[in-house]
Image: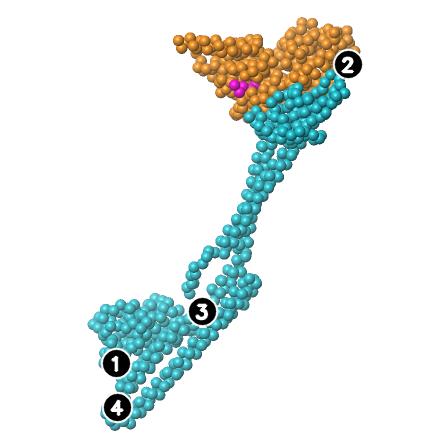
Chain colours: A orange, B cyan
């Protein structure tokens, strides 16, 4: 009888967990573990797998339920007070910031969180565990005879001077569909007015719009695209490794650096396990694994200091501005007007 | 010289220090409070200014148009709120009283907004205390004015952290101020009381005969005390001179008539042939002798008391002095067929003492011995030097002490119980004891084996 109730409870909680759309889900564990930590993440399972395995090696009693969803679904799940997640990982800094600001995150302090630089945490609620530059990638053969662009102004000049080469062969995020694309576009717009000029010029060349970095990188490699603007550098570096035909460029006027962040939801069922996984991510071992196995650059103030063009997107209330629905609507309509020609 | 003990209501130094410390503590506390208050107000003003700028930055971007109000929140509006710390930010924008964006339950100001500058208020929101800035702007939409309210709120953790830091510094400042001021008040108390201590020390250090007025310079507050002290010294000095004069006069006025009376009685005795009258005259002469002795002892005692306070020490050869005194008593002893057995060193026994006091003491010792010795008795007078003490022993073969204690017999006007038949004032041994005490010596009576008593006077040499 008790088993039946337990099973019913599990089914109900599993049904509850499906109040938002998930992309992937995997259970790491043998079933012998005492407890389960549930992680809701926007990062692909393949990338995180080495980390989960190492975490379980260090904590044999803990199984890991790893669920992948889009940034907006992750935000909806947490702000809708969906139960079941003990740690929430997302690349959408603005949405994570919104969650923390609106009180959906728990405070957590440990040796590991205290070791983070001030720009990589907010209110002891939101913690960055990887810093990823947002880059331009291009196909070298298509640029034959052209100088590779170093700044956005270079890129604008190239596009204007050689429209036939780029027509229909430029790729970028569609901020209407992708949370990461929206964050990159808004941060570009905030940093510099050249963004709007670039958008106008790209809009004139019938750009192809994507909702993920992976597809853009693949299309550049396949030759379907000449260049892709605003691609996650970590994915690009991994996918383009050893490909002589592709180039990865950090634009020198500025290169946004995305912070991949984690928070422990206020409504977490096992916040102490979420905290344990978070501390593992931030520990020296976890950071080394993130850097070497997951391919996400570790949190490192020195590399930012040495490369002046890299600007980490600041974890401050400014991020809340573009989450505002009116602002979002306004931005997207302007962007659409600039890029999408009908 | 023993210092007199007064029961005093505490020490001036303690009272002064205590009062200064209390004053300093109060001042330190006030300093702490004022720094804290001023710092808190300054921080709040600064934070309000930033919050107000953010609010106005949003209000400045409001645009009218044909189809509604255009709202474009500048990135910097919120970004600047993150400059001072990690505070949560909430906002709400209302057009004609209806919320168009932001947090719909963010509290509104409870008074109508007006003017260009923001209105600030503090409320509880989302289980945090928030500082809120609200500003109102009028925007023309389709030629109709529309009222737009912009409300921006910020939690106060950065402000509280700065105020707490300021408070800590203020506390450290207050403590430092207290420590320095406490040290200074200790020094002040010491320097204020220095003249008093100096005066007390100078007066206390004076010799017993030093009755000069105090003439050292003192602060004006102490001048009345010193003046009073000088008057007192002058009166004391006068009283002492009068006492000395009185003693001398009294000795003269009483002894001289007694001597005259005795001389005349002796003449009368020689001239009288009537046996009965002669017996009566002899009795009179004895009585006169006794009276003269008693008066002498009373005067001696008075002189000893006076001189104990007014000693004039000089170098004295105790051996010579004792021999001289024994010689003086020779005739009186011979009358009663009493002999002296002397045991006095040939070398001088030098000591520093008051000659009159010592003479008085030895005289009384010998007098007592002669008086209480049996007829045809022998009195032994021995002087010896033992270490740093001179010991003078006068022993007789008289009636002894009958078990009375030495201390009892040397009390003033105390006499032994076995001497009712001998005339005496009971002052003799008291004088000896007082002289011994005045010189730091010792006096005791001891019973002698085989009858009689010994009077032992010890005096320190030097």
Locate the N terminus of chain B by quadrant. bottom left
Q: Nearer the viewer, residue B1 or A5?
A: A5
Q: Is residue B76 left or right of residue A58?
A: right
Q: Check disc 3 and report the residue beneath it.
A: B208
Q: Nearer the viewer, residue B432 or B50?
A: B50
Magenta run includes residue A266: yes
Q: From what the image shows, is residue B29 above or below residue B109?
A: below
Query: Mark 4 or mark 2: which is in front?
Result: 4
Tell me where residue A200 sits by quadrant.
top right
- The chain under label 2 reads A
Q: Residue at x 27, y 89 (%)?
A: B281
Q: Check disc 4 and report the residue beneath it.
A: B278
- The residue tagged with tag 1: helix, strand or loop? loop
Provide residue A202's location: percent of width, then percent of height. Answer: 74, 11
Magenta highlight: main SS: loop
Q: Residue at x 44, y 9 (%)?
A: A7
Q: Of marks 1 and 3, which one's residue comes earlier in the chain? A: 3
Instruction: Report how far apart the C-alphas of labels 2 and 1 lie in the structure.
Output: 152 Å
Q: Nearer the viewer, residue B291 or A327?
A: A327
Q: Check disc 1 and report the residue beneath it.
A: B338
Provide residue B329's location: percent of width, then percent of height. Answer: 31, 81
Q: Which residues are magenta?
A: A262-267
Q: Check disc 2 and report the residue beneath it.
A: A157
Q: From what the image shows, is residue B174 above or below residue A211?
A: below
Q: From what the image shows, is residue A242 above or below residue B271?
A: above
- The chain under label 4 reads B
- Can residue B166 be seen from the camera position used here? yes
Q: Do the dots labelled 3 and 2 sit on one chain?
A: no
Magenta run includes residue A37: no
Residues at discs 4 and 1 in contact (Cβ within 8 Å): no
Q: Residue at x 54, y 22 (%)?
A: A106
């Amino acid at each position: 009888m008790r088993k039946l109730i337990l099973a019913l409870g599990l089914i109900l909680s599993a049904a509850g967990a499906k109040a938002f759309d998930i992309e992937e889900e995997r259970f790491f564990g043998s079933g012998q573990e005492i407890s389960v930590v549930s992680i809701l993440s926007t990062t692909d399972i393949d990338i995180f797998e080495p980390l989960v395995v190492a975490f379980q090696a260090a904590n044999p009693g803990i199984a890991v339920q790893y669920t992948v969803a889009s940034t907006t679904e992750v935000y909806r799940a947490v702000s809708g007070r969906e139960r079941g997640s003990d740690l929430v990982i997302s690349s959408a800094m603005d949405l994570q910031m919104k969650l923390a600001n609106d009180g959906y995150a728990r405070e957590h302090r440990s040796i590991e969180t205290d070791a983070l630089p001030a720009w990589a945490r907010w209110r002891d609620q939101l913690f960055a565990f990887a810093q990823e530059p947002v880059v331009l990638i291009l196909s070298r053969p298509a640029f034959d005879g052209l100088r590779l662009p170093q700044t956005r102004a270079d890129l604008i000049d190239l596009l204007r001077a050689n429209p036939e080469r780029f027509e229909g062969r430029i790729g970028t995020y569609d901020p209407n569909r992708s949370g990461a694309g929206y964050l990159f576009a808004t941060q570009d717009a905030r940093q510099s007015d050249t963004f709007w000029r670039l958008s106008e010029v790209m809009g004139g060349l019938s750009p192809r719009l994507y909702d993920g970095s992976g597809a853009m990188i693949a299309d550049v490699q396949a030759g379907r695209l000449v260049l892709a603007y605003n691609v996650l550098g970590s994915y690009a570096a991994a996918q383009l490794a050893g490909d002589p035909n592709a180039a990865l460029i950090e634009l020198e006027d500025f290169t946004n650096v995305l912070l991949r962040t984690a928070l422990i939801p206020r409504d977490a069922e096992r916040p102490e396990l979420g905290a344990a996984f978070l501390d593992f991510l931030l520990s020296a071992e976890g950071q080394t694994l993130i850097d070497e196995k997951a391919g996400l650059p570790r949190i490192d103030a020195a590399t930012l200091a040495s490369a002046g063009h890299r600007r980490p997107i600041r974890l401050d209330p400014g991020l809340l501005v573009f989450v505002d629905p009116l602002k979002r609507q306004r931005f997207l309509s302007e962007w659409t007007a600039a890029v999408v020609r009908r | 010289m023993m210092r007199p003990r007064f029961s005093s209501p505490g020490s001036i130094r303690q009272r002064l220090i205590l009062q200064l410390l209390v004053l300093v503590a109060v001042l330190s506390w006030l300093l702490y409070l004022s720094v804290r208050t001023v710092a808190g107000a300054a921080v709040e003003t600064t934070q309000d200014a930033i919050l107000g700028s953010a609010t106005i930055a949003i209000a400045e971007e409001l645009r009218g148009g044909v189809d509604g109000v255009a709202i474009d929140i500048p990135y910097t509006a919120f970004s600047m709120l993150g400059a001072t710390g990690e505070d949560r930010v909430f906002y709400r924008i209302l057009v004609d009283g209806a919320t168009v964006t932001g947090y719909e339950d963010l509290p509104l100001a409870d008074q109508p907004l007006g003017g260009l500058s923001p209105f600030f208020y503090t409320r509880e929101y989302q289980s945090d205390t928030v500082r809120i800035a609200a500003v109102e702007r009028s925007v023309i939409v389709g030629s109709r004015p529309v009222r737009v309210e912009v409300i921006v709120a910020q939690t106060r953790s950065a402000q509280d952290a700065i105020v707490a830091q300021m408070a800590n510094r203020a506390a450290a400042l207050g403590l430092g101020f207290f420590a320095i001021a406490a040290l200074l008040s200790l020094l002040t108390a010491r320097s204020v009381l220095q003249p008093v201590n100096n005066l007390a020390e100078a007066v206390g250090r004076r010799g017993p005969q030093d009755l000069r007025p105090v003439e050292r310079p003192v602060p004006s507050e102490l001048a009345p005390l010193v003046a009073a002290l000088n008057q007192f010294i002058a009166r004391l000095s006068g009283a002492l001179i009068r006492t000395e004069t009185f003693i001398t006069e009294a000795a003269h006025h009483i002894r001289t008539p007694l001597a005259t009376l005795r001389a005349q009685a002796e003449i009368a005795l020689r001239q009288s042939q009537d046996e009965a009258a002669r017996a009566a005259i002899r009795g009179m002469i004895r009585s006169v002798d006794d009276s003269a002795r008693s008066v002498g002892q009373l005067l001696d005692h008075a002189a000893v008391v006076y001189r104990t306070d007014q000693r004039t020490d000089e170098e004295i050869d105790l051996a010579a002095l004792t021999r001289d005194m024994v010689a003086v008593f020779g005739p009186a002893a011979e009358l009663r067929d009493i002999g002296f057995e002397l045991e006095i060193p040939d070398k001088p026994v030098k000591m520093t003492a008051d000659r009159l006091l010592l003479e008085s003491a030895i005289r009384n010792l010998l007098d007592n011995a002669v008086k209480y010795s049996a007829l045809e008795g022998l009195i032994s007078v021995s002087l010896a030097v033992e270490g740093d003490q001179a010991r003078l022993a006068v022993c007789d073969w008289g009636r002894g002490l009958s078990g009375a204690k030495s201390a009892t017999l040397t009390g003033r006007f105390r006499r032994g119980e076995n001497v009712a038949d001998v005339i005496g004032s009971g002052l003799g041994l008291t004088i000896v004891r007082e002289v011994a005490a005045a010189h730091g010596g010792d006096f005791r009576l001891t019973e002698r084996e085989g009858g009689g008593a010994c009077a032992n006077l010890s005096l320190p040499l030097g």
